[in-house]
Image (cartoon, rainbow, N blue to C red):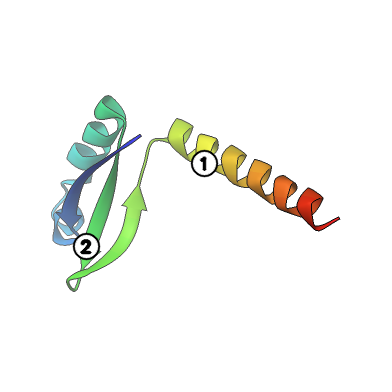
Amino acid sequence: MKYGKTYKAQMFNRGQSSKVFKEVCQNSIAACVIRNSEPYVAILKHEDFMDLLEKANKYDEMMKEAKK
């Protein structure tokens, strides 16, 4: 997964969300939404999200084993 573009939150208020979602899915990138000049939310493809969850769970398991 690559880091993609940043988008202003205003785009979503103007009905441009489908454009962002399509770009994220087609290019397998992560997008950052900016609100009030601060990072507000990240958008990523569902498959990439599930991969991140799996990696996080494996890391947690490794840390639990290391503490034993």
Q: Residues within 10 Å of mark 2 (few under 14, many from 20)?
A: some
Tell me what residue is drawn at x 26 percent, y 53 percent: 32
Tell me what residue is drawn at x 47 percent, y 31 percent: 47
**Between marks 1 and 2, how big is the CA–CA gap?**
22 Å
Tell me what residue is drawn at x 80 percent, y 58 percent: 67
Residue 7 drawn at (x, y percent):
17, 53
Residue 52 is labelled as 1
Furthest residue toward bottom: 36
Type of amino acid under label 1: Leu
Query: Considering depth in this image, is 59 or 43 the residue closer to the camera?
Result: 59
Residue 59 drawn at (x, y percent):
64, 46
- Give left or right: position of 17 versus 14: right
Residue 24 is labelled as none
**Which quarter of the rendered picture does the C terminus lie within?**
bottom right
Q: Residues within 10 Å of mark 1 (few under 14, many from 20)?
A: few
Furthest residue toward top: 26
**Which quarter of the rendered picture does the N terminus lie within?**
top left
Looking at the rendered structure, the number of numbered marks drawn on it comes to: 2
Type of amino acid under label 2: Ile
Q: Reading the chain from its start, which is encountered first: label 1 or label 2?
A: 2
Task: Please give the residue where the numbered disc 2 appears in the rendered image.
Answer: 34
Tell me what residue is drawn at x 18 percent, y 38 percent: 19
- Give left or right: position of 27 versus 63: left
Say if mark 1 contacts mark 2, CB within 8 Å.
no
Q: In this rendering, which labeled residue sits more in front, label 1 or label 2?
A: 1
Query: Considering depth in this image, is 63 or 55 the residue closer to the camera?
Result: 63
The image quadrant that residue 22 belongs to is top left
Residue 61 drawn at (x, y percent):
74, 46
